[in-house]
Amino acid sequence: MKKVTIALIGAGSRGMESYGSYALQNPYELEFVAVAEINSGRRAKFQQLHNLPAERVFADWRELLSQPKLADAVLICTQDRMHFEPAMAALQAGYHVLLEKPMSPDPAECVKMGAYAAEVGRVFSICHVLRFTSFFSTLKRLLDEGAIGRLISIEHSENVAYWHYAHSYVRGNWRNTALSSPMILAKSCHDMDILLWLADANCTRLSSFGTLTHFKSENAPPGAPMRCTDGCPAAHTCAYYAPKFYLTGKDGWPASVVSVDTSRKSLMKALEEGPYGRCVYHCDNDVVDHQVVNLQFDNDVTAAFTMCAFTDDVTRKIKLMGTKGEMWGTMARDTNQIEVNEFGTGTHKVYTLSNEGGPQGHGGGDFGIIRDFLRLVRSEGRETGLTAAATSVQSHLLAFAAEEARLKHSVIEMDEYGRRWGFERLVANEI
């Protein structure tokens, strides 16, 4: 098996902890040989972990890509609005590319990236990691095997968890649409992609509703200051009190996002000065805290999706209804189970699945996407991936259309919406 070399652009939580850890655990499959990261602390930590020489460590991705080709591929894990330029530059420089989701908060940029990757013949995969989990891959296999007959309808929910939502979407990097992207794209483009995959058809129309309801200044406890560390009177009763959440003595996520140095002293300083110490009711967040999307596909399958911040744990729950039976399950940290009922026979089957990759590994999907990308790179693009450009752009367009439907209180016809952004030309090129 040929070892694949990769240059990393963006050594944040995803690049450092999710994908970097795979390389450390599987050194004969993958080696990171260069890194570009603007944060000096993260840059130094990644350099140390992967034993990189100084001449392979850069503060800016432009410096990295201006060098003679350093690796087989580039993995891009920058923020949402910092994907398009490095992705296009890396493809132009001859690299295969694995790009974190969402591709871009601009649908035109998504289509352009997909079209250019096809034009230059490079592997261009998007990190729709849920397709590579044992949970969703088993659901797909059972559907394809006819376990519930012809699929008719899907109910799917993403339970974000109150603490995860507060961390990432109130205090964190994805709190504000203008700075990152809308919630349905930043968080739930995974789910749009899964619905598209399971329905196994093109979406014809959709509608959506949702708002930011709770995390507003008018809902703050009486006397709550701008920061939790400034003497909040609700410190002992507020579920979102920052020191209680981050000063747990644990080194990994989410403390590692707050500060590279996860000592109590450094974390406390970060809470006193940085974004993660702010009161959740006094932030500059504007993304929705709950949203629903209804979809119809051209094979008559219908789907209802719900995203909600107000849950206790991070889970995805799904129910699939078919002509011969029904199937449901929960994907969570400690529960990864699917049940199938067959109509008329009383047959009931339970599938208990593995959850590889640790608590932040998306049920094994993080490692699964890396393995698939390495396979594609070794084949020089001759083999097909599950998250190729045309497929990923299509699921992104569902998220963009859902946000437009929410804002305009309208039903979006997807054929017209796709033509607006040139999606049909991308599909033609892919074929």
Image (cartoon, helix red, strand yellow):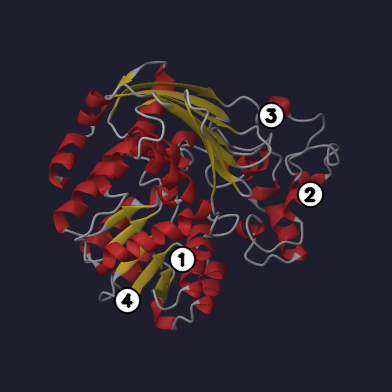
The front one of 50 and 179 is 50
**Disc 4 element:** loop
**Disc 3 element:** helix
Q: Which label sits on residue 1? A: 4
**Position of 196 relative to 266 (above/below):** above
The front one of 29 and 212 is 29
Query: Looking at the rendering, in which quadrant would you find the C terminus?
Result: top left
Residue that protrudes farthest toward the bottom in the picture: 53
Looking at the image, tell me whether mark 4 or mark 1 is earlier in sequence order: 4
210 sits left or right of 257 in the view: left
Looking at the image, tell me whether mark 3 or mark 2 is earlier in sequence order: 3
The front one of 141 and 348 is 348
State the separation of the CA atoms marked 4 and 3: 56 Å
Q: Which label sits on residue 217? A: 3
State the separation of the CA atoms marked 1 and 2: 30 Å
Query: Looking at the rendering, in which quadrant would you find the N terminus?
Result: bottom left
Residue hosting label 1:
37
Residue hosting label 2:
244
Q: Amino acid at mark 4?
A: Met
State the separation of the CA atoms marked 4 and 2: 47 Å
The front one of 25 and 124 is 25
Q: In terms of image quadrants, where is residue 312?
A: top right
**Disc 1 element:** loop
Residue 237 screen position, x and y as percent: 84, 37
Q: Which label sits on residue 95? A: none
Label 4 environment density (alpha carbons within 10 Å; few <14, some 14–19, many ≥20): few
Looking at the image, tell me whether mark 3 or mark 1 is earlier in sequence order: 1
Callout in the foreground (1, 2): 2
Q: Amino acid at mark 1?
A: Glu
